[in-house]
Structures are given as structure tokens and as C-alpha cells.
Amino acid sequence: MGHDPDTVPVTSFLARRAEVLAAGRSSADADISLVDASLNDDDPFIRVTALGALSAQGRLTGDALLAALNDEAPEVRLRAAQLAPKAVGRGSRRRLAEELRSRLTDPVPICVVAVLVAIADRHDHGAAEALCALAATHRDPLVVEEAVATLGALGDEIGLDTVLAATTGKPALRRRAVAALGGFSGPRVEEALDRLADDRDWQVRQAVAMLRRGDDPDG
């Protein structure tokens, strides 16, 4: 009985992916070569798998991420951003930071969200101004919310006005803004929290209560 031709490509893909995954758990020369070759595979999902395998081998350099962040496939760019905080070596650290900032203009919103998480994890204060611009202009609400959250994670005073502006947005954005305000201090922050403590959205009010409870050493 012959194979159904519609199932052969799927089987082949799964086998190749499993092979790359297994190679990621090995430091043998053949497995290193396989992972390196798979970074340039025609299938973007094999390239995605190869990035994870490269990280598992402890060889995920900034140069490898720079290439992946510019991949034509959004799946690869997404995975590269997710793995950016795990980059090894310091040789291309500045270039990687610059590339992540440039990817804030990625046309795929989920890729931008992943870049924002990476910027927060890497504590890249140099991105603060770009984050403010992004929060003020991007059309996707998830991107705006993540930009505000990232400004809060950085806690750079440059971002405070943007976070305060977000406290007047839609409920989901106000909730993220409350959490972001935890990265700042001062009378303007307390005034905003006082106002949000009486917000019409119960989740916003709850977020304020939780934030202030966390700030209270006796709470």
C-alpha cells in the first residue's frame, strides 16, 4: 500500500523538526553542523526550531539573532525576539539592542509585542523615547499596552508622561498603566493612583489596591 502523497510532506517536516530538536541537546560536531545548516532551511518553521536548538546548545549569539530578526518570515522574527534575552557573548550586544529597537516598526503586531518584552528583559533604557512614540502612535491596542508596560519595567522618567496619559485610555490600557506606575514614584504618580482607585472599572480599582498593598511593608 503506497503512502498518501498529502501526508508525506507533513511526516517529513515532523521528522526533520524532531532531528533538529534532538541535535539541540547535543554538542557533537555533526549536531552542531545540523543546527547551523537548519538556520538557513527553506521552511521557516525549521528555522524557528533551529533557533531554539542553537539556544539549547548555548551558542545563540547576537549575530545569529540579528540575522533572524531580519528574516522574511514573521514566525522567525517572533522567535528571535523571544530568545533575544538569552543571547550569549557580548560582542554584538549594542548592535542587537539597536536592531531590537528598529524592529519596533515590524508590520506584524505580535512580533512588536515580543520585541517589547525583550527590551524590558534586557533593561534597554536607550529605547525609552522610541517606546513613548510607539505608545502614542501605534494602532494595535496590544502593542500600545505592551509599550506602556515596558516603560513601567524600565522606570525611566522619560516614559512617565506616556504612562500617565495611558491612565485615561480604555480599561485594558488603564490596567496596564496602573502596573506600569509601579515603576515610578512622586506626587504625580500618587495623584493618578488616587484617581484610578475610584475608576469605574473594577479591575482597574483592584490593580491599584494590589499595587498599593505591595508597596505597604505592613500589607
Image: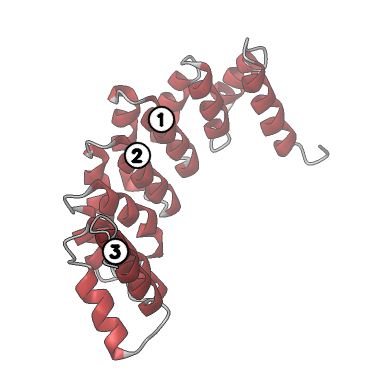
In the foreground, 59 or 152: 59
Horizontal and vertical percent position of residue 96? 26, 58
In the foreground, 33 or 219: 33
Per the image, the residue denoted by label 3 is 13
The quarter of the image holding the C terminus is: top right
* Residue at screen point 31% across, 35% down: 109
Which residue reaches farthest front? 1
* Residue at screen point 30% across, 68% down: 1
Assign a secondary structure to mark 2: helix
Horizontal and vertical percent position of residue 161? 42, 24
Three-letter amino acid code at disc 3? Phe
The disc label shown at residue 110, or none? 2
Marks 2/1 in contact by CB < 8 Å: the verdict is yes
> Where is 188 relative to 157, above or below?
above
- Give the mark, 3 or 2, whose residue is nearer the N terminus: 3
Of circles 3 and 2, the one toward us is: 3
Residue 51: tell me if it is visible.
no
Per the image, the residue denoted by label 1 is 142
Marks 1/3 in contact by CB < 8 Å: the verdict is no
The disc label shown at residue 98, or none? none
Assign a secondary structure to mark 1: helix
Q: Is residue 41 left or right of residue 80?
A: left
Three-letter amino acid code at disc 2? Ile
